[in-house]
Image (cartoon, rainbow, N blue to C red):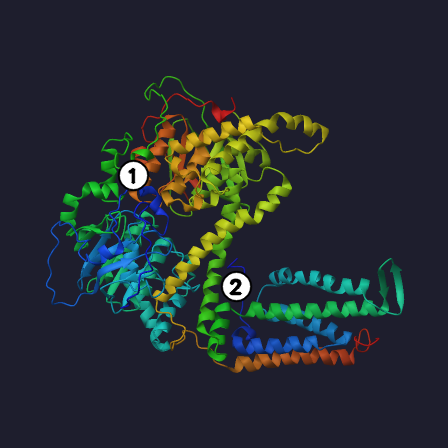
Amino acid sequence: MENRKVEPLRERRAEARPHKPDGESAERENVQLQLGPLEERVSMPGAAEPDGAGRPTREESEEPAAEAAGLRLKFPGAPDLLFRDLSLKIRRGEKVLLLGPSGCGKSTLLQVLGGIIPRVTEVPLKAERLKVPESAGIVFQDPDTQFCMPYVDEELAFVLENLAVPREEMMPRIEAALLQVGLNLPDPHVPIGSLSQGMKQRLALASALLLEPDTLLLDEPSALLDPEGRRTIWEAVRRVCERRTVIIVEHRIEEVLDWVDRVVLFRDDGSIMADGSAAAIFGRYRAELRQYGIWYPEAWDDAYGRGISGKGLDGAAPEQRITARAVLPAQESGEVSEPLLRLENFRVLRGGKVVCAVESAAVMPGDLIALTGPNGAGKSSLLLGLMGLLPREGECRYGADAPVGRREVRETAAKRAAFVFQNPEFQFVTNRVLDEVAFTLRGEAEAARNAGRRSVLARLGLPRRRTKPGSGAEAGIALRADECLNRFGLGDYADRHPYLLSLGQKRRLSVASAVVSDKPLLLLDEPTFGQDARNAFAMLDLCEELRASGHAVLMITHENEIAERLATQVWRVEGGRLVSAESTGRPRASRVRLAEGGEA
Amino acid sequence: MKRFFEPSRRTWLHRANPAVKLALFVLLFVVTMLTHRIDASFYLACVFLLLLFAASGYPIWKTALLASGFALAFASASLTMILFGKGSEIWWSFGPVAISKESFYRGLHLGFRSIAFGCQGLLFVLTTSSTGLFYALMQRLKLSPKYAYSFMASLRLMPMALEELRIRRDALAVRGSGSGSRAGALLRLPERYALPLLAQSIRRAQRTAAAMEVKRFDAGSRRTYYYSSPVTRSDAAALLLLAGATAAALLLAQALPVFNLGDMRMVP
């Protein structure tokens, strides 16, 4: 229980914006905050009372498991308070789910209740009353950053060491904890790196259990897992949580809904909108859930209907929609078009070994191909091979071109296909959002200029010189880049550093900078992975738009719904081989709008 | 890489307490450093090279691969001394380069010593696990757990950073950022790689730190240890082995001198 003074607050009513530490703030600029001067807020402790939804009245006699009353918290450098007199009480043994839009402060609240803030992470906060559980175990989102030791047993022993458990008692406890979470390892001395992501999360749960916590705090434990991992971690949580208080923050709630006692719904600005049973919340606040990007069980139905056609999503902010839709009569399937990509006897190698083999496959314009299969089957290698980033054998035609030789393959692939990596940050090469898109265009313009000169210069044995683009060309590039940003709903952020965008925006920017030059083929590595529903649907909507305009999209995904609802083909990779490439029967746009490769 | 650095068999040196072993090897370094006779340094290099192959517990090809780096160490240490060292008995000279008898032997002496150093260091590294070393240092030498666990945690983060370096390289290739003038690309290199990799690493380190504190890691409080770090008979064996090897080298230098020269600091 720690009370801290809030930093002196600057009064910035006019430019008050909700601030989130992870940069999510940018997407919700339109939210108006009613921010009074500090003195006013101090005198209004009940300002952030929930607005009903049948909040159950509990007897005050019982000592709560965790409680925050009149909590105010502000991140250093943020213009505004994250919580204004927030009050929340959690009873012993209660299973509570905290829901809200990304960046509304759920995770921060969880960290406050778990005692991380301000004990570990120093954030100025002040509360009338703050009670954190005597012992709390926390499972975080990222499976890779929760461990400090190389082996499973050592990691669990680390917890016991901290508790000063005698050495002889360690092994039995370790084995018991592993059993509890369903990790049946014959010998616990296994490298953590060899576990799957889902197993790592269960290991994190096991190490939380070794603390013998009365309260378990789960901070999106399944957000970065595939469906199988998601299922197993929640199974494990349910198994161990019986007599414990459990507080969950999660965007994906299918697996959680039927056993939580209480759902607390937050607004954008960090105040509580509703607090009640799951059924009550879902009855009344479905529209909000949808708007906040929460993966509730019927999210896909609501976004796409029960049919297969990709309807737009009215839940997303309108400026996120792409307006430049291609004029395409979708059902005019007379002519057969040239495939954008054709693979025959194609093999991708890594370290001299075949990691993905494709006997025969083709990507047509208008295709949306879901590339599925278990982890480590070779899906990512296939995409890297298509881009020429891994050595390969066999035939791979990009349209009419069949490049030979590493350099030529890379150049042709870069001209015909765009690749968006899972972590968009790795693809940013400039310090400004606009430049990021313009960079692609400049590179393209330069390549076009050089293409003519190269043959002559090469014959003379002269080195290629870099040519400066004329001011006219530069203006054209800026214009096109700007247009592209507007199309992707990033127009307002043109001058920002790419790193300061929210995750959803970063992904859109990396797609924008990839498709701005009309490359017909777009390769995506799990574009919806770890995203909230709103961003995921926005991304898929984007793919649909591109598809309708004659692009083809090839995406790795673990999401069955994508394969079922949106894909025109499903490719399944297993054990380093493309085992099936089936058409889903969904029509692809039949006419090609793009001049291939955009060389015209 | 993880598999590569797994010994195929365990020797006495593996079983010895890492803290004791560290002390022994530091002592060895000092002895090697204070060797001033070329015969002694030659035999030290030979004996520890043999010991490296015999006692590291790795297959010969792996050891040979790792030890091949010593050739470079030998060349770089000895060549400068041979070519530019001072001496009175000039064998050959050309411009600033003058090979004298003294500089030649001093160069060889330096080279042998660097091989001996290299073998000793590699022998220690190959027979000691980092986890074991830190546990021993915490328990035997009272190293603060704060440093020990931070080091172990950072070792875990290293392969992730390497993986990201690879991804960044691929991503840049996809974006075509390699184009443009060579010099410009070279100048931009640190910026291109440092920013995204650092950003990601810092986030990761911060998260790991939070996770460790949540597991009640507190450097100040009393703690127990999963691995005990006792001093056993293996330590005595390791001591005898290393002392025997050193003694053998020095005795051989006395009994079967190859170069038969005096103190290398004097005129040999």
The quadrant the C terminus of chain B occupies is bottom right
Amino acid residing under circle 1: Glu
Residue A38 position in % (x across, y down): 26, 56
- Identified at 20% across, 56% down, the residue is A96
- Whether callout 2 and callout 1 share a subunit is answered no
Report helix, strand or loop for mark 1: helix
Give the side of residue A440 with respect to residue A456, left or right: left
Q: Mark 2 highlights which residue?
A: B6
- The subunit letter for the residue under badge 1 reads A
Left or right: residue A489 compared with residue B86 = left
> Is A413 or A93 nearer to us in this picture?
A93
Q: CA distance from mark 2 to mark 1?
A: 43 Å
Category of crowding for the residue at label 1, using alpha-carbon neighbours closer than 10 angstroms: few (below 14), some (14–19), many (at least 20) = few
Residue located beneath label 1 in the image? A561
Instruction: State left or right for residue A526 relative to residue A596.
Output: left
Which quadrant holds residue A459? top right
Residue B211 lies, in percent from the top left, at: 37, 62
